[in-house]
Image: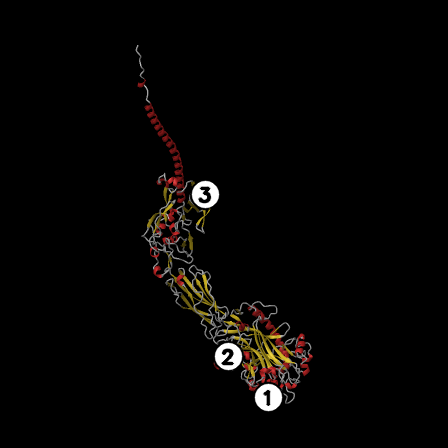
Amino acid sequence: MKGWRDMVQSTQRRNAAMVVLAMLAIVFAAFVGSAQAEAPPKSGDGDPMEDVGNATKPYGTDESGNHGYWVFVCQSAAEAGYTGKLNKAFVPAIIDRDMWVPNTSEKKLYPASPRYKLNMDDPALSISRLDSSASDLNAAVDVWDSCDSTLPVASRSFGVKRDTSFKEPLRRWDAVKAGRIPYHSNGDGHPDVHGNGYAQGTLGVKWYSSFKDDTSLEVRQMYFRDELRNVRTKETTARDGLDTDKSWAPGWDAGWIVNRDLSGERAGDVFRMCTYGGTWFDGRYANTWWKDITSDAILSHNEMWADENFSTQKGGSTDASSKFYAEDSIDAAKKAHEYWGNMTGSGTNSAPKSTCRIAYDGEAKSSAGEWYWSDRNQRINGIVVQYVCGEKVVSKQECRGLGSGSGLQEDAGVINRFNSQGAGVQVNGALMFMLDKKAPTVKITGGSLDLNGGALTKKPTSTPDNLEFDASDDAGLRNVSIVITKPNGTKETVRDASNVTSDGLVCDYRYIVPCAGGTGGSVTDDDGEIPGTDTPSNNPPWVSKSRDAMLSDYLINGQELPPGNYTIAVTATDASNQSASDTASFSVGNVNREHDCHGNEITPGMTPALCGTTSEVCTTASTCAPPPTAEECCTGGGSTVPDPTPGKGIFSYDLAVNPTATGSAPPSTGCKVIESVIKGNGDGGGLSDREKNQIISVTLDFSGFSTLGTSLGTQDLRTTFDLPSRRDSRYRNALGCPG
Amino acid sequence: MRMIRPTNRESAFTLIEMLIAMVLVSGLLVIASTLLVRSFGESGRSQQERKAMQSVRDTTAKFGNDLRVARAPDRNPAYVGNGNELGSALLADQELQLKLPGGTTQTLDVRDVVEATSRSFAFRADVNPAAGVECVRYAVDEVGGPFVREVRTYDTATRSCGAVLERQELIQAVQG
């Protein structure tokens, strides 16, 4: 830390930094422009976080056409119903120095233990006491940890501050000494930093993304918005260790580390870091950017608490143009003797350092750099970083640190101390654009449905057939659909299911693994023509770490389908909207369908014809295999046309009837002509539709008129006509009555 | 002198004879008048019968003429499919789905009889060549009502005769 400050204090360095700032600003503008091309339209202030966060389309492509998807942090956790452990795949968390600095020499120099640190296993207990001698620390600090899902891009914050209402000096002193929670906020009483040493701690936020090493996922862009805040109390009691006098110089720094857990020879505490320039290098610690909020000023006690002189820029108390706090906040802060505000300034931000300190085997690296994100007031709100690395997996991302200031001891024996009573980090939102260069896979694996052209020959009452398939994807499946192409070429979606868990969420990259067992999603059937179950027979069999797979089967009553050839396609769509399909075919033969008592197939929506006085339908395999004849099927058997009934109807009909004729194979024998058919005893009853088509002649008989029939011979009143259409030999052949 | 007596008994009819004659003449007159009356009555009845028979003959001829132009809408030109398809359509009383080269399907209506009851018979016929195929219906719709011939439109949706285009009463007679 001392070295950094020395560098910043160097005029040459600052000038260089300004030049780099300008260059980076240009690059940043270009970057934002390119980001806009990928993301949905942005609002006026160009904040990619807000714009993308409000987007309804969570996926897109980069400039090379690679598919990818946005990952929203915190919001994702809220969507996933986060209430407890942060064991999601990609979550914001607050880290302290100890968690992201490996066991390096620096760590040895400033031993982290005993100390309190974030307990990732149980964030509710965010700080766990490791030092048995400081049992009262938790009583002396306030800890907050929240994730608010009500905000557009949900916020998460974490922080610590000393409980200033805790008035028992000795115990508070113990807390301060032993706490270092993190170092930054509570001072440092460790002997190693006593004397001419300086103390520093890091409170930061981290994202960690865990991806499998063999996936094709790659971080393409990352946006991050946070606020680093300082909590301090207007106290002047030196004996409480809070007297700053001349002995402190707070500062803060922020940086990004991109690292991955490596296997094999790279295993260990070595990070692999990715620069926005597209190169990877190994390192242990990256502090790419920092800002000295006091610069070269060593503020006096009075200056320190003068608020307005606490500048983020050079000059300290002499720089009246760059006030640290907003005017309207000062009074409130003074009244409360406490201030909770941004550690940002209203003036121009300092430039990212051109020579970023990278601890690479003890050597500094200068190739890393970041862009920071500012609002219109030029307050540093966060950092925008873009990684363009050719390699793939980033298994862990750790980001943004808030470093402590340092203190120089003026008087021997006086414990070095900071003014800050606490610090907090509020995460407003973060998102990544993950490149997903691998499409999902889907394969129909079989099932009882006789695929690959096989015909379904089962009886109508047999159990449905099932289609089985496997689908998987690195990032997670967004949806799996099943579409059946019917014989007439029309397509029908019979299942369109998201990978839904029992709590209604899509089990993909956003969800904790393993996902809660789900129902497998909903089923749609456009027109009801494809009979099948409305619910897949089994839930997606989620197993540990299998959020990316979907295995299910779909039941379909194929034997009830209209005859013909069918194609069934299973399409899986992943998080980045890439799709893959697998198809199979089957056919349904024109056999074993339900028939009415006339032997006609009963198709969906068709009302079975009457057979005399009965409407019996063959519904069992025993009566319907082979296809029934009318005699076999109908109660009482016999002709499909009743015998002529006496009556005084004007019209009577001669019918050519072949009971076995179905049209599919006109029988050559069995035709008989039934003459003078009158339905309904002459009271107006009519022939059936089938019978109307079997009429070969019609008799017009006026003898039923009383005044004529009694005196005139029926010879003159009765005339029979052949129907011209029924003289057609093809017509009669079709009816099974050739001739 | 001697007196001579007239012989009247030999030149006149007796009362009995006269009574008998009168009875006979009356009987003959009765018979003659009865025959005459019957003759006159039978003459009027034959005229009604002739009219009725003519109406029947006209109606029958009309019916035959209409029936000669009966046809299903899609049976001219001649159906080119095979008998199986035609039989399936007729027996199921459905439209014929004719498969054409190239995989397309043409829907043909090959049914001509629309209604066939003991009191009505309707069929589709081209009675007006300029207007397509109509629905011709002969019926006694009401007991005791007239026998009528109607030319109607054809309602494809309901497969029944629609609005009346022409109505013609044929026989004014009471059905027993």
Q: Residue furthest front?
A: B1
Q: CA distance from mark 3 to mark 1?
A: 121 Å
Give the foreground label among 3 and 1: 3
Q: At x 45% / y 43%, what residue is drawn?
A: B167
The amino acid at mark 3 is Arg
Q: Nearer the viewer, residue A413 or A142?
A: A142
Q: Could you say where residue A118 lies in the image, as x and y percent from the top left?
A: 55, 81
Q: Is residue B82 visible?
A: no
Give the label on residue A261, or none.
2
Q: Is residue A724 left or right of residue A578?
A: left
Q: Could you say where residue A319 lies in the image, as x and y percent from the top left?
A: 68, 78
Q: Nearer the viewer, residue A101 or A449?
A: A449
Q: Is residue A258 left or right of residue A555?
A: right
Q: Could you say where residue A130 lies in the image, as x and y percent from the top left?
A: 55, 84
Q: Residue furthest bottom?
A: A412
Mark 2 and mark 3 in contact (Cβ < 8 Å)?
no
What chain does badge 2 belong to? A
Q: Is residue A302 left or right of residue A629?
A: right
Q: Which residue is mark 1?
A: A191
Query: In the rendered view of the protein, which quadrant contains the N terminus of chain A?
Result: bottom right
Give the label on residue B167, or none.
3
Q: Nearer the viewer, residue A387 or B171?
A: B171
Q: Residues within 10 Å of mark 1 (few under 14, many from 20)?
A: few
Q: Within the image, what quadrant is residue A170 found in?
A: bottom right
* Marks 3/1 same chain: no
The amino acid at mark 1 is Pro
Q: CA distance from mark 3 to mark 2?
A: 95 Å
Q: At x 62% / y 72%, what residue is drawn?
A: A375
How many numbered marks have been drawn onto this rendered protein structure? 3
